Image (cartoon, coloured by chain):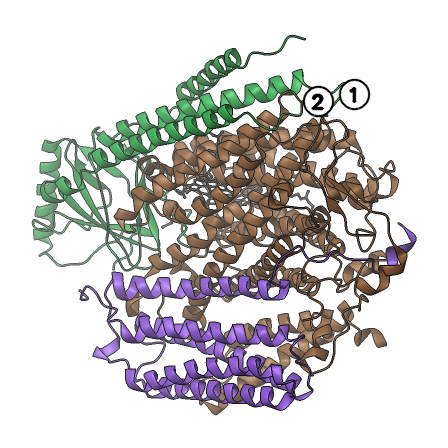
Chain colours: A brown, B green, C purple
C-alpha cells in the first residue's frame, strides 16, 4: 500500500486525523501545565483539531512535498514537472500544478457547492411556500439561510471566478502557467477544507447568524458558529493566495508585446479584483478572529459587558464585504466583455473606459461599506458621504453597461447560448443595480432595510449579475476546455428557463419588501401568501433548470461535436491553441502585435504564435517561482 | 436596411420606461402613509422608481433592437464595424448618470434633513424609550408622570413628534413600523435614536427586522396569532384619558415596579 | 497536441521588469498583511480615539522596557541586512553568523514581550481594551515568530552554503519579511505605547 504514503487523497485520510490528534495532545498538555480548568475543554479541542486537521489535509494531498527539500537545505529541481498536467480523470483528484487542471478543479468543485447552496434555498423556499410553519423549525430555518448565504458567497461565487481566471488568464497572457503553480494548487485545496468546515457545522448545532454572523447573536450560538468563523478564514486565505498569484502573473508574465492596453478585458477585470481581494479580505479575517476570540477565549471585543462595541464588527465586516460584492462581479464584467466582443464580432466599445471603470469601481468600492449600516445607529456624520460615494459607483458601472450596448450595436450578433446569457445579464443586472441605487439613498433605505427588498436587490446582482456571467463564461470556454461543442438547443432551454424563472423568483421580492416583509423569517403575514407561493414554485423550476446545464456539460464532453481550435473565431491568445490546450500551453513564446479585439479589420491579428523549436525545448523552460 | 436613428430610439425608450414605472407605481400599493415623513419618503421612492424605469427602458430597448436588427443570419460570416469608440458619446453617458445620481443624492439629503425632526422631537415631543429583548419590546415613556411599561400596545397621540430611544438587552433587533417608513436597530451597548410624526389615527404593525435568534420570526405583530404589540395612534383627547387611566392604575398598585413584558412574563 | 507538448517548451522570459515574481508576490502579500493589522488598528482607533476608553484600572503602559525592546528589534533589522551584504564574500559562515545574531535578537524581543505580558497587570479578558492590546501585540508576536522560523530556515540553507550573490531570492524574501515585521512594530509602538490614544475622556 504505497498510496497511503504518496500524495493522494488516501494519504489525507491519515495525515489529517494525525495532525488533529497531535494538536489535541499538545493542547491538553499545555492546558494541564498552565493549570487551566477544565483540562479537556470540548470547544477548544474541536477548534484546534479542525485547524490542525485542515493543515494535515494540505500536507497529505502534497501541498508541501516540494518545499521540504528547500526547508531542509537541499537543492530544488526547477525542472520537476511531475505534478503538472492531467492524463486521466484520476489526476483531477491529486495535487496538480497545471493551471488548467486547477481551473477545472475549481470550477467543478465550486459548481457542486452551488448546487448544495441551491438545495438549501429550495429547502427553505418550501418552508416559505405557505404561511405557518410546516417543514422547518425556526432553528433549522436560520441554519439553512445562513448556510445558503455563506456557501454561495465564500465557497462558490468568489472562488469560481478564481477558477475561470486560473484557466483562462495564463493562456490569454501567453504564459506557460501561473507565477506560483504550487501556491495555486494549495489555494485550491484549501477550499474543500473550508467547505467541509462549513458544512460539518450541522453536526455541531450549525450557525444561525446569517452569512454576516453579527455579534452578539454569534456569541449565543452553538459550536457551529466557530466553524463558520474558521471556514471563512480558510476560504479567505485561499482567495488571498490566488489574488497574489494573479497579480504576480499579470504583472510579470505577459508575453512580449502585451502592453497593459493590449490585455484582454478579462485580465483587466481580474487585475482590479485581485487588488481588491488583497486589500480587503484580511478585514473579514480580522473580524472573524476577534469574534472567535470572544467565543473561545472569553475576550470582550464585541460583548456587551466589558466595554465591547458590536458596531465595530459591522464596520470591519462590511469593510471587506462591500468590496467583496465587487470581487464577486468584476471578473464577471470581464467575462461579458470577452463574450460580447467575440460573439458580436466587434471590438469592445471604449476599451480604455471599460478597463479604467474596473479600477474606478475597485477604488470607490472601499469608500461605501457603511451603506449596509444606515439603520445601525452608527456615527451619523458618516452617512451622507457614504451615500454620495455609493451613488457615484453607478457612473463607472453605467459606462460598462453602455459600452457593451455600444459593442452590440452594429455588430453581427451570433445568438449562441454564451451570448444569450451575456445579453440576459445586462437586462437583469441593470434591474439589480438600479435597486441598489435606490437603496443608497438614506431615507428610502431606512424605510425598508432588512426587508425582502434587499433580498431582491442582491439576488438580482448576484444571480442576475454574477451567475449569468458565469454561465456565459462557462459556455464560451467550454469548447476550449473540452474540445467539444455543447448542445445549443439544450443551452437555449437552459437560458430561457433560467431567465424567466429567475425574474419570477426574485422580482416579487421587491414588492414584498416594500409592503413590510422582513428578511430571515420562517413565517409571514397572510397578505404575502400568493407572492410567496409564486416565488417558491418559480424557485423550484429555476433549480431544476440547472440540471439541464449539468446534463449538457457532462453529456457533450463525450458526445458533442468536435469543436476545433477556434469555434467562435476569437482573437485572444487562448483561441490560438489547440482545444484542449497542450500541457505546457504555448510551443514557443507568442509575440503580441496588436489589441485583443480587432474584429472587423481585414487580416488583423492580436499575436503571433511561433512553431515549436524542439532543440531548445528542454532547457529553458522554468515556470517562474520554481527557483525560489 | 436603413440605419437606425439613435435619438428617436432613446425617446421611445424613455417613454416605455416611464410607462413601466407608472404601472409599477400605480399597482404596488404601499402600506398606508401613517406619518409625515412617509409622504416625503414615498415621493422620493416614486421619483427614483421613475428615473430607474427610464434608464431600464432605454437600456432594454437598445438591447432588444440591437439583437433583432444586428442578428447574424445562419452561416453569416460578416464581421461588425471596427469601431473602437466614439468619444463624445462616452462623455455623454458618463455625464448624464453623474447628473442623475447627484440629483438623487440631493433628494435624499433634503428628505433626510426634513425628516430629521429629531432635534425638535427630543425637546418638545414625546420621548419613548424602547428596550428590545429576545423576543419582544418593552416601552418606558412619560417617565416623569408614570411608569407605563405595563401596557402592551404603544399608544401615541396623532400629529405630535415622537422621539425614540432604542436599547437592547441582548442582541441586535430592529424596530420597524412599515407604515411610518421608519426603522432603527437596537444595538447592544448603545442608545440609538430616531423620530417620527404619526399623522393618522389607527393601529399599525411593529416588525423586528433584524435576525435576533430563534424567536425572530415571531417578533412580528403581523403574523397570525402574534402576541407582539402594535402601535395605536389616537387623538390627543383619547391619549389624555388613556394616560390618566394608566396613572390611576399605577397608583392603585402603589407604583410597584413590576414590569410586565409583552410576552406575558414578569421581569 | 504536438509531439513536443509533453516536454517543457521554451518559455517566455518574464515581461521586462526588475522585480522577480517571488519578490513581487511577497510584497503583494505584505500589503494584505498590512490590511490584517489594519482591521485591528481600526478596532483600536474606534475604541481608544473615538470612544476614549482607557486602559483597565488607570493602568500605565510600560514604555521604558518596551523602548529598549524596540531598539533590539530595530537593531535586528540591520543585522539581517548585513547578512545579505556579507553574501558578496562568497563564504557561508558570515551569512550564517549575521542570521544567527538576527535570530537571537528576535528571540530576545519575543522573550521580553512575553515577560511584559506576564507582568502587565491585566489580561486579554479584562475589557475590550485588554483584548485589543493583547491581540495587536500578539498578532505582531505571531509575525515575529514566523520570522524566526524563516530565519532558522535561512540559517539551515546558509549552513549548506545555498546562498550566493547570484541565488538568494529566498534570503531576500526573508529579509524583506523581517523588515516588514520591524516596521509594523514601529508603527504599533508609536500608536499603542507612545501616543496618548485617549482624545476625549471616557464618559
Ligand atoms: C454582486 C454583488 C453586488 C453588486 C454588484 C451590488 C451593487 C450595488 N449595491 Fe448591493 N448588495 C449586495 C450585493 C451587490 N450589490 C448584497 C449581497 C447586499 C446585501 C448584504 C446583506 O445584507 O446580506 C447588498 C446590499 C446593498 C445595500 C444595503 C441595503 C441594506 O441592507 O439596507 C445597498 C445600499 O446602498 C446597496 C447598494 C448597491 C449599489 C448602489 C450598487 C451599485 O454598484 C450598482 C451599480 C449599477 C447600476 C446603477 C446599473 C447600471 C448603470 C447604469 C445603467 C447607468 C445609469 C444609472 C444611473 C444613473 C443610476 N447594496
Ligand atoms: C451567489 C449567491 C446566491 C445565489 C446564487 C442564490 C440563489 C438563490 N437564493 Fe439566495 N441568498 C444569498 C445568496 C445567493 N442566493 C445570500 C448571500 C443570502 C443572505 C443570507 C442571509 O440572510 O444571511 C440569500 C438569501 C436568500 C433568501 C432570503 C432568506 C431569508 O432572508 O429568510 C431567499 C428566499 O427566498 C433566497 C432564495 C434563493 C433562491 C431561490 C435561489 C436560487 O437561485 C437557487 C437555485 C437552486 C439551485 C441552483 C440548486 C439546484 C439543485 C438541484 C437541482 C439539485 C442537485 C443537487 C445536488 C446533487 C446536491 N436566498
Ligand atoms: Cu428581534 Cu428579530
Ligand atoms: Cu454594499
Disc 1 under 8 Å from ligand 1? The reply is no
Res A525 seen here: yes
Q: Is residue C153 above or below residue C201?
A: below
Residue A200 in the image: x percent, y percent? 61, 62
Q: Quadrant of residue A451?
A: top left
Q: Quadrant of residue B38?
A: top left
**Residue A512 in the figure: left or right of residue B171:** right
Q: Please report, as a chain letter, where disc 2 is located.
A: A
Residue A456 in the image: x percent, y percent? 49, 36
Residue B76 is labelled as 1
Give yes or no for contact between labels 2 and 1 (Cβ–Cβ under 8 Å).
yes
The residues bearing labels 2 and 1 have C-alpha atoms spaced at a distance of 8 Å
Q: Secondary structure at mark 2?
A: loop
Residue A530 in the image: x percent, y percent? 50, 29
Which residue is painted at 66% across and 74% down in the image?
Answer: A56
**Residue B156 in the figure: left or right of residue B4:** left
Q: Residues within 10 Å of mark 2 (few under 14, many from 20)?
A: many
**Residue in front for this viewpoint, B155 or C181:** C181
Q: Is residue C33 above or below residue A89?
A: below
Residue A412 is labelled as 2
Q: Quadrant of ligand 2?
A: top right
Residue A70 in the image: x percent, y percent? 69, 78
Q: Please report, as a chain letter, where disc 1 is located.
A: B
Residue at the farthest front position? C89
- Same chain under badges 2 and 1? The reply is no
How many numbered badges does the structure rendering display? 2
Amino acid at each position: 500500500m504505497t498510496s497511503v504514503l504518496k500524495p493522494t487523497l488516501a494519504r489525507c485520510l491519515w495525515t489529517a486525523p494525525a495532525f488533529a490528534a497531535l494538536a489535541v495532545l499538545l493542547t491538553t498538555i499545555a492546558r494541564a501545565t498552565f493549570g487551566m480548568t477544565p483540562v479537556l475543554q470540548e470547544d477548544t479541542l474541536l477548534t484546534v483539531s479542525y485547524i490542525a486537521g485542515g493543515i494535515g489535509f494540505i500536507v497529505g494531498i502534497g501541498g508541501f512535498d516540494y518545499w521540504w527539500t528547500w526547508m531542509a537545505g537541499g537543492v530544488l529541481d526547477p525542472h520537476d514537472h511531475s505534478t503538472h498536467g492531467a492524463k486521466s480523470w484520476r489526476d483531477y483528484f491529486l495535487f496538480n500544478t497545471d493551471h488548467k487542471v486547477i481551473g477545472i478543479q475549481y470550477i467543478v468543485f465550486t459548481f457542486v457547492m452551488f448546487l448544495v447552496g441551491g438545495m438549501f434555498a429550495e429547502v427553505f423556499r418550501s418552508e416559505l411556500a405557505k404561511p405557518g410553519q410546516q417543514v422547518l423549525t425556526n432553528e433549522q430555518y436560520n441554519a439553512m439561510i445562513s448556510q445558503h448565504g455563506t456557501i454561495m458567497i465564500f465557497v462558490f461565487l468568489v472562488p469560481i471566478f478564481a477558477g475561470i481566471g486560473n484557466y483562462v488568464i495564463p493562456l490569454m497572457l501567453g504564459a506557460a502557467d501561473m507565477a506560483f503553480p504550487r501556491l495555486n494548487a494549495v489555494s485550491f485545496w484549501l477550499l474543500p477544507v473550508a467547505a467541509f468546515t462549513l458544512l460539518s457545522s450541522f453536526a455541531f448545532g450549525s450557525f444561525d447568524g446569517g452569512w454576516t454572523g453579527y455579534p452578539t447573536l454569534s456569541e449565543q450560538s452553538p459550536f457551529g458558529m466557530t466553524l463558520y468563523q474558521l471556514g471563512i478564514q480558510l476560504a479567505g486565505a485561499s482567495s488571498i493566495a490566488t489574488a497574489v498569484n494573479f497579480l504576480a502573473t499579470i504583472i510579470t508574465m505577459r508575453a512580449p508585446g502585451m502592453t497593459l492596453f493590449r490585455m484582454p478585458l478579462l485580465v483587466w477585470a481580474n487585475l482590479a479584483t485581485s487588488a481588491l481581494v488583497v486589500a480587503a479580505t484580511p478585514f473579514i479575517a480580522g473580524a472573524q478572529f476577534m469574534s472567535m476570540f470572544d467565543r473561545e477565549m472569553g475576550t470582550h471585543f464585541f460583548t456587551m459587558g466589558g466595554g465591547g462595541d458590536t458596531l465595530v464588527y459591522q464596520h470591519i465586516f462590511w469593510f471587506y464585504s462591500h468590496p467583496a460584492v465587487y470581487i464577486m462581479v468584476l471578473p464577471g464584467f470581464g467575462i461579458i466583455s470577452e463574450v460580447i466582443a467575440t460573439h458580436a464580432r466587434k471590438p469592445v466599445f471604449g476599451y480604455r473606459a471599460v478597463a479604467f471603470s474596473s479600477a474606478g469601481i475597485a477604488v470607490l468600492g472601499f469608500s461605501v461599506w457603511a451603506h449596509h449600516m444606515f439603520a445601525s445607529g452608527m456615527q451619523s456624520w458618516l452617512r451622507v458621504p457614504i451615500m454620495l460615494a455609493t451613488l457615484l459607483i453607478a457612473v463607472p458601472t453605467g459606462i460598462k453597461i453602455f459600452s457593451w450596448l455600444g459593442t452590440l450595436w452594429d455588430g453581427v450578433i451570433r445568438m449562441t447560448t454564451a451570448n444569450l446569457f451575456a445579453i440576459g445579464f445586462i437586462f437583469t443586472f441593470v434591474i439589480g443595480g438600479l435597486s441598489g441605487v435606490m437603496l443608497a439613498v438614506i431615507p428610502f433605505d431606512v424605510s425598508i432595510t432588512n426587508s425582502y427588498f434587499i433580498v431582491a436587490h442582491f439576488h438580482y446582482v448576484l444571480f442576475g449579475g454574477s451567475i449569468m456571467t458565469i454561465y456565459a463564461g462557462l459556455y464560451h470556454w467550454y469548447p476550449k476546455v473540452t474540445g467539444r461543442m455543447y448542445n445549443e438547443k439544450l443551452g437555449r432551454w437552459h437560458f430561457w428557463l433560467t431567465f424567466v424563472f429567475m425574474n419570477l423568483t426574485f422580482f416579487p421580492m421587491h414588492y414584498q419588501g416594500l409592503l413590510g416583509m422582513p428578511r430571515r423569517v420562517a413565517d409571514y403575514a397572510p397578505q404575502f401568501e400568493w407572492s410567496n407561493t409564486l416565488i417558491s414554485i418559480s424557485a423550484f423550476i429555476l433549480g431544476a433548470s440547472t440540471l439541464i446545464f449539468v446534463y449538457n456539460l457532462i453529456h457533450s464532453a463525450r458526445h458533442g461535436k468536435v469543436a476545433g481550435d477556434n469555434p467562435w473565431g476569437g482573437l485572444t491568445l487562448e483561441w490560438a491553441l489547440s482545444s484542449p490546450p497542450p500541457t505546457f500551453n504555448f510551443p514557443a513564446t507568442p509575440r503580441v502585435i496588436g489589441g485583443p479585439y480587432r474584429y472587423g479589420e481585414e487580416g488583423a491579428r492580436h499575436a503571433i504564435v511561433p512553431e515549436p523549436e524542439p532543440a531548445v525545448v528542454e532547457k529553458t523552460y522554468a515556470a517562474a517561482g520554481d527557483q525560489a | 436596411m436603413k440605419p437606425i436613428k439613435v435619438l428617436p430610439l432613446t425617446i421611445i425608450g424613455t417613454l416605455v420606461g416611464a410607462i413601466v414605472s407608472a404601472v409599477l407605481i400605480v399597482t404596488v400599493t404601499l402600506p398606508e402613509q401613517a406619518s409625515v415623513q412617509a409622504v416625503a419618503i414615498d415621493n422620493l421612492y416614486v421619483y427614483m422608481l421613475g428615473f430607474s424605469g427610464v434608464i431600464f427602458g432605454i437600456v432594454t430597448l437598445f438591447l432588444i433592437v440591437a439583437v433583432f436588427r444586428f442578428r447574424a443570419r445562419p452561416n453569416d460570416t460578416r464581421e461588425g464595424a471596427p469601431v473602437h469608440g466614439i468619444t463624445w458619446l462616452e462623455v455623454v453617458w458618463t455625464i448624464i448618470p453623474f447628473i442623475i445620481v447627484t440629483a438623487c443624492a440631493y433628494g435624499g439629503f433634503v428628505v433626510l434633513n426634513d425628516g430629521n425632526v429629531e432635534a425638535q422631537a427630543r425637546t418638545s415631543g414625546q420621548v419613548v424609550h424602547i428596550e428590545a429583548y429576545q423576543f419582544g419590546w418593552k416601552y418606558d415613556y412619560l417617565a416623569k408622570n408614570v411608569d407605563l411599561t405595563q401596557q402592551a400596545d404603544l399608544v401615541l397621540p396623532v400629529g405630535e413628534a415622537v422621539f425614540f430611544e432604542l436599547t437592547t438587552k441582548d442582541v441586535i433587533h430592529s424596530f420597524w413600523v412599515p407604515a411610518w417608513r421608519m426603522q432603527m436597530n437596537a444595538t447592544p451597548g448603545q442608545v440609538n435614536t430616531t423620530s417620527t410624526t404619526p399623522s393618522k389615527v389607527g393601529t399599525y404593525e411593529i416588525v423586528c427586522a433584524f435576525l435576533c435568534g430563534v424567536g425572530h420570526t415571531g417578533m412580528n405583530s403581523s403574523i397570525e396569532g402574534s402576541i407582539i404589540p402594535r402601535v395605536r395612534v389616537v387623538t390627543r383627547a383619547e391619549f389624555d384619558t388613556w394616560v390618566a387611566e394608566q396613572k390611576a392604575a399605577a397608583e392603585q398598585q402603589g407604583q410597584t415596579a413590576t414590569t410586565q413584558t409583552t410576552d406575558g412574563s414578569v421581569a | 497536441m504536438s509531439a513536443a507538448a509533453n516536454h517543457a517548451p521554451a518559455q517566455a522570459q518574464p515581461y521586462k521588469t526588475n522585480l522577480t515574481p517571488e519578490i513581487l508576490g511577497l510584497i503583494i502579500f505584505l500589503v494584505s498583511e498590512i490590511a490584517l493589522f489594519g482591521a485591528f488598528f481600526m478596532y483600536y482607533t474606534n475604541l481608544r480615539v473615538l470612544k476614549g476608553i482607557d486602559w483597565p484600572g488607570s493602568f500605565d503602559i510600560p514604555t521604558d522596557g518596551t523602548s529598549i525592546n524596540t531598539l533590539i528589534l530595530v537593531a535586528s533589522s540591520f543585522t539581517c541586512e548585513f547578512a545579505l551584504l556579507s553574501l558578496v564574500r562568497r563564504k557561508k559562515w558570515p551569512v550564517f553568523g549575521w542570521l544567527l545574531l538576527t535570530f537571537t535578537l528576535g528571540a530576545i524581543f519575543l522573550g521580553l514581550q512575553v515577560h511584559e505580558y506576564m507582568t502587565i497587570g491585566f489580561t486579554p479578558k479584562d475589557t475590550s481594551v485588554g483584548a485589543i492590546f493583547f491581540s495587536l501585540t500578539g498578532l505582531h508576536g505571531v509575525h515575529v515568530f514566523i520570522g524566526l522560523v524563516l530565519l532558522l530556515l535561512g540559517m539551515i540553507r546558509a549552513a549548506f552554503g545555498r546562498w550566493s550573490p547570484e541565488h538568494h531570492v529566498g534570503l531576500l524574501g526573508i529579509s524583506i519579511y523581517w523588515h516588514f515585521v520591524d516596521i509594523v512594530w514601529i508603527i504599533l509602538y508609536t500608536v499603542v505605547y507612545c501616543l496618548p490614544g485617549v482624545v476625549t475622556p471616557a464618559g
